[in-house]
Amino acid sequence: MRTELATSTVWRSWFRWTTAGEFAGFLAPALVGALTSSPQLLVLAGVVEGAVLGAAQAVVLRRVDRTLNSYSWISATALAAGFAWALAMLVVHNGDRLNALPLTAVLPIAAVAGIGVLLSLGTAQWLVLRNHLPHAHRWIWANAFAWGAGLLVFTAVTTPLWQPGQPPELIALIGALGGLLMAATMAAVTGAALTRIMRDRGAQERPEGVPAKAVRS
């Protein structure tokens, strides 16, 4: 991968843009969720979230590799986000039916849905990234871990704050706070993964006997 940013600066740039992009994008489902419980609208809001996140990430990736197609990255991210939201809404919408099932049936369904949500974004982005970075399959697992950590942070923050009967404005504000912390967590982890993959690429391209400092990352 031909890079124009040193790996020491990639993480900081990625963290800023990805945090901002995910936070701005997450405002769409946060606002929609505060105003309506429509699964269809929430899925569409999820697509918007993915598009905004993908556009922000593409800013950094294009600086790292100008051959990366921004449209492909944004489209993959938007579609994957929509898929993740659709899967989550499918589970929520059928909550009563799932509650009627025995635990031995619910657990596999929950596991499949959870895995699908966590792997969706990383897998879609990997389809683009594999053409530019070796060992790009690591991106799938890094994203799964990052989103898992981010969702845990979001849940830990919002669950005790959200209470029945709250006005939509407060619900949206709490969701936005949780979204910001989720975005920062996800951005930090994926940024570390990106710089690690870039360092591995730089090590492969470095001529034998040439020290790392002599080759731009």
Image (spheres, rainbow, N blue to C red):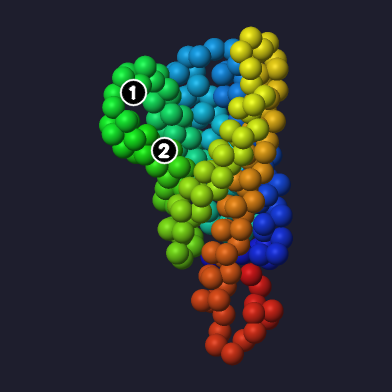
Side of 154 relative to 102 (left or right): right
Q: Is residue 13 left or right of residue 131?
A: right
- Residue located at (62% from left, 35% from top): 156
Q: Which is more toward the observer, 169 or 52?
A: 169
> Front-most of 215 and 81?
81
Is residue 101 shown above or below 141? above
Q: Residues within 10 Å of mark 1 (few under 14, many from 20)?
A: some
Nearer the observer, 139 or 173: 173
Quadrant location of the N terminus?
Answer: bottom right
Q: Nearer the viewer, residue 5 or 93?
A: 93
Q: Which residue is mark 2?
A: 114
x 40%, y 42%: residue: 115
Other residues around mark 2 within 10 Å, as few (<14) / some (14–19) / many (≥20): some
Q: Label 1, secondary structure: give it.
A: helix
Looking at the rendered image, the quarter that the C terminus falls into is bottom right
Res 98 label? 1
Give the mark, 2 or 1, whose residue is nearer the N terminus. 1
Count of residue discs: 2
Residue 24 in view here? no
Mark toward the viewer: 2 or 1: 1
- Residue 112: x %, y % from top left: 34, 38
Kindly identify the residue that appears in the image at 68 percent across and 49 percent down.
Answer: 15
Label 2 residue SS: helix
Q: Is residue 58 left or right of residue 123?
A: right
Q: CA distance from mark 2 to mark 1?
A: 15 Å
Q: Amino acid at mark 1?
A: Leu
Q: Residue furthest bottom?
A: 209
